[in-house]
Structure formats: structure tokens, C-alpha cells
Image (cartoon, rainbow, N blue to C red):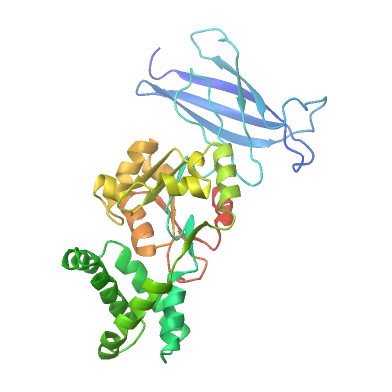
Amino acid sequence: MHSTNRIRAWVSLLAVCRREVKPPQLLAWIAKSRLKQGKNSLEIARFGNLAKPKGNFSGFPDSLLVRFQFKNKYSSWGGMLSRRIKIMRNGIPHHITPPNSVRGQIMFSPNGIQAILFDLDGTLRHNQPDGGEIFLAHARSLGLSFSEDDRLLGIRWEHFYWANSITLRADIEKFKDKEPDFWQNYSRRHLVALGISPKQAVELAPILSQHINDHYKPVGVLAAGALGMLSQLKEAGFRLGVVSNRERPYEQEMDELGIRSLFEFSLAAGEVQSYKPHPGIFEAALQRIETPAEATMYVGDNYFADVVGARRAGLRPVLYDPSGIYPEAGCAVIASLVELSKLLA
């Protein structure tokens, strides 16, 4: 068939919605398809809601029945093709799967997002209690005082330090065989970032570091609302993955959190020797998820690692910032993971 031939498709979608969508609606769509460089691409445009469907459709609680009819100026009507597809449910847009004769993925998401990748620590998984809060509490017990601005600056410094900063890499090299010394030095840096004088920080760092080592025994917990949100996204057809700056694979932890089965893959930076915010780790993730960067969203809590890194690699960043640490983030920001659905509608 000549590359300039146009294929026009009339698509009738019979919507059968869940109980929370009242009444069920008949959605009508027009699909336009054309051949481009030997491959078919399909675009969909909604043109309105029609009347409530008649009859009993209880056998199809979550699906639509779609029939495609193809015609071009050189041939008669082609065969009828039927597919089950899913629709918007609970605020989450669902993918529409085209027939095999139409290549390329059709998205129900108006912004074209096909895949969503997540950071692990601080986003999906949280330490309970929070290590930073334990550090501040013990520092205060030693007679130190901090303003709210000091606290926020301290958190920003932590995020910058752990975003594979030059300082972190230098400290790892310097203390590679002396882990207690690494954490004592980290405590000193943290105190300076909180506004404590360098001299006092040197004096108090060993005390704080020892206290954390002796008494801080955190438990990893799943972020509030994460399980339901992830289940809805997976059911909607979005492709999901986890990308972390950890050194080693963490599938066992994901199993313990009850979320491993919801993701197509998980990637540790140490597996590819590329650490956020370097674009290499995001490019490795895109190879696994097989979606374009511009159609892939990345959700993380660390502005310096997650937002900067995602932008460098061409992904769409979303900052998870429940404490309002980055009011000037300059990207989509959510205070809870359940808010993610609003960005996909």
C-alpha cells in the first residue's frame, strides 16, 4: 500500500463503567490512522458523551467492547476486529489497546504518559522513625537549637549530599574501609549544614554519630496510599518501574513491602554504575521499560537526584514533597502519592 494512503477508522466504544460512575455512558470516539514511514500510527480524539446505553451489561463490569472498521480508497471495507479495552476509573486513565493491524500504542491519558518510574527510598519506602528527626532530637538534647529554616536547609543539604555529590564520592573514597569514621564525618557535615559552627560540630559529631549507631533501628514501611495508587496504575495499564541510587538489587525489600509484583522491573544504580542525577541510569531504565523519555514520568523526593536527573534524560519529573521543602521546584509537585492521579487526568 502506498505510504500516502490514509486509513480511516470508525470506532464505537460501548462504555460499561463501575458503580461509582453513574450512569454508565456511551462514549463515542473518532480514530484517525495514517501510514508513516512504513508504520501505522493511530490518534484518538473524543467528541462527546451520548445517551445512557440500553440493556443489561453486567457481564462487562470493567471493559469496553470496541469494533474497528477500516476503509481506504483502494479497497472495500475490511474485516471487523473486536477488542476489550479499559476506561477511566477512580480518576486513573486507562490505556486502549489497538488491534494487531494497527501498530503503536494508543493512550487514554491526555498527556501521553505511558510509563511511570518511581524512586524507592523516601518516595515509596520510608524509614520509621525518620533518621533526620532522630538526629535533630538528640542534637537538641545536647543544648543545640534550630529554627524551622535551619531544619529545611539541613534536609536540602542531605538531599544534595546523597545525590551522588562530589562531596559524597570524596567521602566514600576517603572512608571506604572505615564506616564509623564515615558516619562521624557525615554528622559533622550535617551539623554545619544546620548552622552549627565548624568547631562545635567537630566536638559534637562523635556523640551524635554514636547515639545514632546505638539507638537508631528504623523499620522500612510503605508510603501512605502507595499500595492502592500503584494497584490502580497497574490496572489502568501504565507500565511501572523502580529506579534507585542503591548499590545492590532490592527485590527482597520490595517483596516485604508487598509491591514487587506491581512493577515490571527494579533497577539499582550499582547494577549499571550510573547514579542519579546522571542521565545514564534513566537511559538504562528506559531501555527496560521500552517507552520514549517524553512519555515516561519519574516520581521522586530528592530534587537534586530525581528532578534534575529526570530532566537531563528527558523524562517528565514529579517531585514528591510532603514537607514543602522545595516551593520553587519548577516542576509538578505532589504532597502525597495519591495526588499522582490528578497529573494523569
Q: Is residue 146 visible?
A: no
Q: Nearer the viewer, residue 111 or 226?
A: 226
- Image quadrant holding the N terminus, namely top left
Question: 256 left or right of 307?
Answer: right
What residue is shown at x 38% (from left), y 14% (from top)? 2
**Residue sticking out furthest to the bottom:** 143
The percent position of residue 116, horizontal first and vertical second, equals 46, 45
**Residue sticking out furthest to the left:** 174
Q: Nearer the viewer, residue 10 or 279?
A: 279
Q: Does 136 appear above or below 314?
A: below
Q: Does 286 appear above or below 213?
A: above
Q: Does 192 appear above or below 296?
A: below
**Residue sticking out furthest to the right:** 55
Hey, which quadrant is residue 45 in on the image?
top right
Q: Is residue 82 visible?
A: yes
Hey, which quadrant is residue 293 in on the image?
top left
What residue is shown at x 55% (from left), y 46% (from top)? 230
Q: Nearer the viewer, residue 216 or 169?
A: 216
Q: Does 169 appear above or below 57?
A: below
What residue is shown at x 47% (from left), y 56% (from top)? 125
Figure disc tally: 0
The percent position of residue 11, horizontal first and vertical second, equals 62, 24
Question: 128 left or right of 35?
Answer: right
The percent position of residue 307, horizontal first and vertical second, equals 38, 58
Question: 42 left or right of 244?
Answer: right
The percent position of residue 296, horizontal first and vertical second, equals 42, 44
Hey, which quadrant is residue 288 in on the image?
top left
